């Protein structure tokens, strides 16, 4: 009987821990979504926050001819923008509530051209420190049945105390 009570108590505790993790993840997602919505440039280019997880972020960008360079390919600056933003928000998902992400180093390799198909930037934190986060982000051109790697980036994101808006 004693063993049954212990198992029951342990099971309840594990469910409670899982509930707390789920609540925290929902809170993280809400915080990241709110931060993303405050970025006018993302609205300007039509980028959308596709998914957020603990240490992960995906940004979706539909193809738009207004975002291309002279040859009709997505402009490298646009590709870099969504990679940098996805990296920042992936890091943000692991930061304390009173902090904001700030890119302090960013390197991108543009591997192939992207035209006619939407892009998705997939970022994942490689190493999370107290103040510094190292993040990898791949940008892919997405078709109905395929994905092509367009760019890969490494970013260093600083955990900065929140800056109050003036």
Image (cartoon, helix red, strand yellow):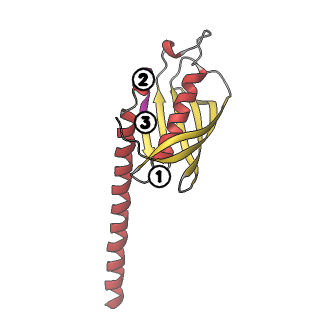
Q: Please say whether residue 77 is one of the residues in the magenta stretch.
A: no
Q: Residue at x 55, y 44 (%)?
A: 157
In this view of the protein, can residue 141 be seen by the observer? no
Q: CA distance from mark 3 to mark 2?
A: 12 Å
104 lies above or below 70: below
| Numbered disc 1: secondary structure | loop
The mark total stands at 3
Name the residue beneath numbered marker 1. 94
Q: Residues within 10 Å of mark 3 (few under 14, many from 20)?
A: some
The residue sitting at the top extreme is 70
Name the residue beneath numbered marker 3. 50
Q: How far across and how far down the image is residue 21, in percent?
A: 38, 60
In this view of the protein, can residue 12 be seen by the observer? yes
Q: CA distance from mark 3 to mark 1?
A: 18 Å
Looking at the image, is mark 3 or mark 1 nearer the viewer?
A: 1
Q: Nearer the viewer, residue 153 or 61?
A: 153
Q: Nearer the viewer, residue 120 or 158?
A: 158
Q: Which residues are magenta?
A: 44-49
Examine the image and state in which quarter residue 9 appears.
bottom left
Name the residue beneath numbered marker 2. 46
- Quadrant of the frame with the N terminus: bottom left
């Amino acid at each position: 009987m004693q063993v049954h009570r212990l198992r029951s108590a342990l099971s309840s505790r594990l469910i409670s821990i899982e509930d707390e993790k789920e609540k925290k993840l929902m809170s993280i997602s809400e915080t990241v979504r709110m931060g993303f919505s405050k970025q006018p440039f993302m609205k300007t280019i039509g980028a959308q926050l596709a998914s957020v997880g603990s240490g992960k972020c995906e940004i979706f960008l539909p193809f738009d001819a207004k975002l291309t360079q002279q040859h009709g390919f997505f402009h490298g600056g646009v590709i870099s923008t969504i990679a940098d933003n996805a990296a920042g928000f992936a890091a943000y998902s692991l930061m304390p509530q009173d902090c904001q992400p700030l890119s302090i180093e960013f390197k991108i390799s543009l591997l192939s051209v992207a035209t006619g198909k939407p892009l998705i930037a997939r970022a994942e934190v490689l190493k999370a420190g107290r103040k510094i986060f190292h993040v990898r982000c791949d940008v892919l051109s997405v078709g109905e049945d395929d994905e092509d790697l367009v760019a890969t980036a490494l970013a260093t994101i600083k955990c900065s105390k929140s800056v109050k808006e003036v």
